[in-house]
Amino acid sequence: MQAVFSTPKSMKEDFKFTFCPGCDHGIAVRLVAELIDELNLKENTICSTCVGCSVFLYDFLNIDCVEAPHGRACASATGVKRTNPEKFVFTYQGDGDFASIGFAESMHTAIRGENISAICINNTTFGMTGGQLGPTTLMGQVTTTSPFGRNKEYYGYPVKIAEQIALCDGTAFSARVALDTIPHINQAKQALKKAFEVQLKGLGFGFVEILSSCPTNWHMTPEEAHEWVKNSMIPEFPLGTFKDLTEVGVNK
Amino acid sequence: MQAVFSTPKSMKEDFKFTFCPGCDHGIAVRLVAELIDELNLKENTICSTCVGCSVFLYDFLNIDCVEAPHGRACASATGVKRTNPEKFVFTYQGDGDFASIGFAESMHTAIRGENISAICINNTTFGMTGGQLGPTTLMGQVTTTSPFGRNKEYYGYPVKIAEQIALCDGTAFSARVALDTIPHINQAKQALKKAFEVQLKGLGFGFVEILSSCPTNWHMTPEEAHEWVKNSMIPEFPLGTFKDLTEVGVNK
Amino acid sequence: MSSEKVLIKGNYAIAQAAINAGCQCYFGYPITPQTEIGEYLSAEMPKLGRGYVSAESELAAINMVVGAAATGAKVMTSSSSCAVALMQEALSYACSDEVPVVVVNVMRAGPGLGYVYPAQGDYNQAVYGGGNGDYKIIVLAPATVQECIDYTYKAFYLARKYRNPVILLADGLLGQMMEPACFGENPYPEVDVSSWALTGAKGRDGKAIYSCARDEKAHIQKIHDLFKKFEIITENETSYEEFETEDAEIILTAFGSMTRNIKAAIRVLREKGVKAGGFRPITLSPFPTKRISELAADGKDFVVVEMNMGQMFKDVKYAVEGKSNVSLVNRPCGEWLSVEEIVSSVEKILNKKEGAYASCI
Amino acid sequence: MSSEKVLIKGNYAIAQAAINAGCQCYFGYPITPQTEIGEYLSAEMPKLGRGYVSAESELAAINMVVGAAATGAKVMTSSSSCAVALMQEALSYACSDEVPVVVVNVMRAGPGLGYVYPAQGDYNQAVYGGGNGDYKIIVLAPATVQECIDYTYKAFYLARKYRNPVILLADGLLGQMMEPACFGENPYPEVDVSSWALTGAKGRDGKAIYSCARDEKAHIQKIHDLFKKFEIITENETSYEEFETEDAEIILTAFGSMTRNIKAAIRVLREKGVKAGGFRPITLSPFPTKRISELAADGKDFVVVEMNMGQMFKDVKYAVEGKSNVSLVNRPCGEWLSVEEIVSSVEKILNKKEGAYASCI
Amino acid sequence: MGLIKVNNSRCKSCYICVNTCPKGLIKKSNKTNRLGDYLVEFDDKNNECVACAMCAKRCPDLAIEVYK
Amino acid sequence: MGLIKVNNSRCKSCYICVNTCPKGLIKKSNKTNRLGDYLVEFDDKNNECVACAMCAKRCPDLAIEVYK
Amino acid sequence: MEKNFILAGFGGQGILLAGTILANSFMLGGKNVTWYPCYGAEMRGGTVNCEVVVSDTEVSSVHKQDADFALVLNQQSFDKFVQRVKAGGTIIANATLVALSKPRDDIKYVFAKMGDIANAIGSSKVTNMVSLGVLADVCDIVSREYLAKAVELVLGEKKKQFLPLNLKALEAGCSALV
Amino acid sequence: MEKNFILAGFGGQGILLAGTILANSFMLGGKNVTWYPCYGAEMRGGTVNCEVVVSDTEVSSVHKQDADFALVLNQQSFDKFVQRVKAGGTIIANATLVALSKPRDDIKYVFAKMGDIANAIGSSKVTNMVSLGVLADVCDIVSREYLAKAVELVLGEKKKQFLPLNLKALEAGCSALV
Ligand SMILES: Cc1ncc(C[n+]2csc(CCOP(=O)(O)OP(=O)(O)O)c2C)c(N)n1
Ligand SMILES: Cc1ncc(C[n+]2csc(CCOP(=O)(O)OP(=O)(O)O)c2C)c(N)n1
Ligand code: SF4
Ligand code: SF4
Ligand code: SF4
Ligand code: SF4
């Protein structure tokens, strides 16, 4: 018999995810590992990791990684890429990391058209610190710091990350995907592939926002969490590609 | 005879602009002062000032001001407004301040729909430090840190501030105006008025990006500088209102 | 309820004390081990019609706090270690602006990310700053949950009384533990801020709060004035606790929640016939240099016990000026030094009389 | 050209020396009085096919530098005072990451904005950090434009040799002045970084650079290792300059470009019959504590001359341990203390023999 | 025709696979993992598994290998 | 019918007003300001000024007052 | 007098709550007491434990290297904390999930089928309350009365409906060893 | 020997350049020298000045409270720096823009119509070069030859076409007082 599905080669042999049971982070990491395998990037990759539930990414992926302080992964990756233009460089960040504390760094990396790929896991909350309100928390959503639900008076509105990034002239690719169903997982992989390819082609910043579940902090079973992604998140954060210059290249 | 044009009352009596000859900052400050007069805000206003050529704003306007560190005026203003919701609170910033070092603070103030008004003077450069490349420097533009002109390889692209701010759900008004001609100056004042009014009505974040000349660092006469605003800046940074919820209010 | 004892976590104690002290608005960003402060306040402040802001970062939070404080509002932020590092620029501004800012640092480990290992590694960060130029912050270090309450009240008061930032330097142990404590009433009077607070230029000219005088001479004067103010603070507010120092030959010194461990160690040492005493700075800044110097002049040796690489040790040694021996018993982070470890280290030091050198466990 | 003298600004000297040292990429954000470093490099680096990045902030710049340094690249950033405060978190990470980061701080005044008044107020900021936890940075303080060149070379070398961040602490005077200087050749050998640098996991497993060991014990060990490394640095690299200390009764001490003023003051004092000598720490961290202690043990008094409120003064006094008198002659910022002011202050001190107290001019 | 192997040291008992398998071939077992949660087991007596790998694609912990 | 007054202590000699006045009534004078630049003067012998205030609206230094 | 208690189990067994109630009972008895939680080196999953220290004077350290009493509700906790009981100390284990074994000679062992007792009362969720009852029975300084008051205090108005069940469980624990 | 020179004028008069050339001339003469610019308290407009200190040993301070020589090209600079010349020092003023006055008795005054001379040569832009010539004439330690070499060095290849005019201006300055 032949394996039709097995662990990507670029995962560490003895990796043990520190994610909670049923957390979509694991799927996102797998997709990244599969693409590193498929595009044959393992020996040529440097990743800037973040602080959040995926802080130990370097224990999962068998690639070189440098840890950035919370929010600074895009800045760190810029440093890596500018001194190693031939390397494949990417970040893997939470939405708090990417779009709250690190929003200036993230946006400016896109504005500069930095030739890197960035992945942002949008789970509407700060997972690692125990489920506080984050930049993507939905209106009305209860978190440990919005115990009466997100309201505009106290907290304002969720940020549309993929759209904001698409608006930057240095962005070559920006999309929003989800992991709640197998078709969505397949689409997510395609989007990640494009975000990787624009870098490999030297076209500019490649970005994917991944709608992702956090069963622990949403206080849901994994299946309920996927339902919630479908019914609550996707309507607010529409899936799709907001910019794709794969063919034409960055516009100037 | 009757005065048909005189110094706004909310200017300090003995103010002396520290701006260079012919610099549009002076016009922008005057429009702000006129509106403070017209809307009768002088006694109820607190401004968060910035670090840049307008750092001494508190010496020009006869209102209460708190100086924010470079880039943090929107954060400072948030602090002021949240503890003084009945006050009229605004920021007056350079584009370096607002959109480079302070971009996270600026964007998140918009995202939170903070009930303040923010003004950003876009002169395509860091004026105060002597004309370096900034977030809005045009492609090809020569500055002291882009001596061969802005190119995408080293510097990436200019940022579209008013559009990015308009995309934030907490923004009630976002416009881009210029000061190169009298009609544009009049439009600028109208836009500023709207940005102030959305605050007074409690509708959310009001924002105006003002295309402004920097004859000193552009190495131009004031008239040449205005020509350059017209011929080089406006085509890249189109004038207009990108969001106006004056009537309907913020969308949620 | 206020005079009753309740079993409460240090973090919640700080949060509720801030409310009792009249905190009008909290600005913060989550970080373990102090996230509960923000969580508590996000639930309680709206009920009181007060403010709570989920800032996008600590950098934003501290600048919000400075802006709000400039209007005379009672406000605070709280954070931990690596994230407090992001506040250094604004804290330098705030000192120069003379605005009453309250910052709570519930320390975790360092350097870098530091996870949540307990530690006391931010002594230098709090006491020596890290912002630019010459400025001084008032630093209060509570040792018990009760003191978390007491010094939160005090932090708000001192900040306003002296128009100077105050850091409440707690640690993860203190933030996470529960202990019976009593809120009582905030014992401090209101401070009149009307002379300087920004309120809108009603019936007067506009005024401004800024960090830097526009003329060199005036700026120099400003710095001298700030330092003179801090001399007054040093005079009036330097605070420490002494136990059994009178006949002591060796004085155990600690700050924060390590204080309880040295107290117990002193009891054990006394039982063993060692004339041990204790000295515990409550204000780390202003530091009780003078009192330590006096004790040293009496020939008493010091053992500094802390969860870092000897940060307060240096200030004790500075104060002692060679008049007696100063030793260090420390661990950089993790498991708090136990009473037994402290006792046996002190015994080793007594046997060797080595003095003035670190004996890192 | 390299062995010829040229009249050059301190800022340009630093920039060109960085190029000569092999700096592969510069990351920075403008701030007076050091903007010329970035301006110079923006013109020169592209010609050499090297990198120049206009970072969006100093916070971004330092994190770019840390990322790049993790790949073994020679990189630097430069900034000034209030903006260096924004780098504290990343510097704490960089120390723990053990990556070779070079940061140039051309000081202006503080606290807060500080405009561009010349000052030396960032001694504490550089030496005591302000990031979290226990870590130590190597700090080099040049006194002349020639030394700007020499110590830029050295900064790149030491950073890589010890995998430790290095701060070149210059001041606005030094950055803005021109003086004849000679670039020579970068005298330091290349350091092999291949054992740790991230280069892509080619033919090996992936490796990671991060700040915090995942297990408490390992993290404690890591901190001890870092401090052991710094002991070796202290042993090998502590550097200072002494002039006429042998027979001196009073030793003027200064760092950075104040050194030239004390040198001249010593000449004047000697002419007046005062046995004055000079001591000038070149490495502010590691600080030449041992040598100062020796000199103090010889009964020599110290006068610390600096443009701040007595920041290095405290470290000198710490080193002296009460063995002799330590006085302070200072101004917090602005006009550099003149030779005449220094001479007359020293004379006053000699007359009063007051010792150990600040005599702020 | 198909076959899956569950890696018990990776499985975190989220049961997504149980709900995903279109043929219902994955079930809670009565073995527990180190947290005391019940592991899953592949139960395909009738050789219904077509190796569609849907279970594996949705398993967040890379605990399932699929063979054909 | 119109009249302007130039505040010499505010004027920075940018000459925008000179170029703006549709009737050409503002000219460089030969008085200098404290930087040694030539100030402007209002020269309206034929009472052409209609107080359109265009000069004032474009003056970046609030140096012009307009009367009617 | 200073005694410390480690309470341990897996997430969901209500360990932190049990510790809180124990600490409150000491406070109600007029003692000095501290409660300190540990989440272990791993952030997610794994065992949870907390430490309660009671003292006549101010508590000396809130987190000690060894314990006078260990109350363990699952096997992993037993394996870990049996090593950290002081010589002469006591480990009290939930025999429903912990296998009967005595790896050391210098400590006392108490095994009680707390889970079974809880199930019998109505819910395995109150295993923690049963365990506190057992502790009160075994340990002189833990008072049944103050424990009961502490349960009431901690549950408060909001969770008043759970009070009877919890008190019943506590009671059952107190007499489990008879 | 240590002497310092303040050069001052308004922006655009080429003060910093003149100072640079003076400093280079000292360097070429084998002296220790420093050059330090001051932009005054105000950031924009106003006077510009720089200070050149020449010394046999290392320069003691690059920015001193008083000066041995002040070279001032406009009235404001005269008014300001006449006060900062050491007793016994010399102020050299551009009489084209500076009114002849001698507010102090303890210093020497040199007035020369440098602007007029420069205009006569072809451009008021070389007033600064004329002034350096005057300085060389007045001050022993400033060497005409090294100044000329310094002009060449500073203008470099790129601005070689301006060399003749500048040298001519320098020359004219040297003989202006005759
Ligand atoms: C400067 C700083 N601030 C705050 C923290 C605490 N912290 C760690 S992770 C995190 C947020 C994590 O949320 P997100 O980035 O959305 O990632 P997730 O955990 O949800 O995957 C925070 C606030 C920190 N480590 N450093
Ligand atoms: C943290 C910090 N970084 C850098 C600076 C230096 N700085 C002062 S103003 C400025 C930029 C000014 O440009 P902009 O905001 O566009 O305003 P403008 O001067 O053009 O009006 C900079 C970089 C500073 N003061 N503080
Ligand atoms: S906290 Fe949420 S995002 Fe983090 S690992 Fe758990 S489920 Fe995933
Ligand atoms: S530098 Fe530019 S923006 Fe600044 S005052 Fe001068 S002209 Fe205006
Ligand atoms: S989906 Fe994976 S982790 Fe979840 S129960 Fe199935 S095998 Fe286990
Ligand atoms: S526009 Fe104003 S500043 Fe400019 S020349 Fe005219 S009056 Fe003077």
Image: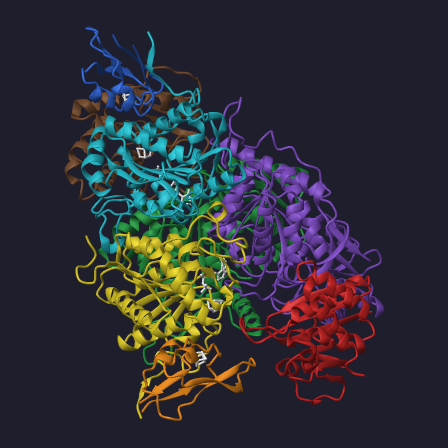
Chain colours: A yellow, B cyan, C purple, D green, E orange, F blue, G red, H brown
Q: Considering depth in this image, is A197 or B200 the residue closer to the camera? A: B200
Q: Considering depth in this image, is D215 or E13 the residue closer to the camera? A: E13
Q: Considering depth in this image, is G147 or F43 the residue closer to the camera? A: G147
In the rendered view, does C252 fall on the left or right side of D329? right
In the rendered view, does C22 fall on the left or right side of A167? right
Above or below — where is A216 with respect to C151?
below
Residue G28 on image: x %, y %:
79, 62
Decide if residue C303 is in sight here: no
Residue C10 on image: x %, y %:
66, 57
Screen quadrant of the N terminus of chain A: bottom left
Decide if residue A172 is in sight here: yes
Instruction: Answer with the quarter of the image where residue C312 lies.
Output: bottom right
**Figure quadrant, ligand 5:** bottom left
In the rendered view, does G41 fall on the left or right side of A166? right
Residue F66 on image: x %, y %:
30, 14
How many labels sit on residues?
0
Above or below — where is G76 with respect to C255?
below
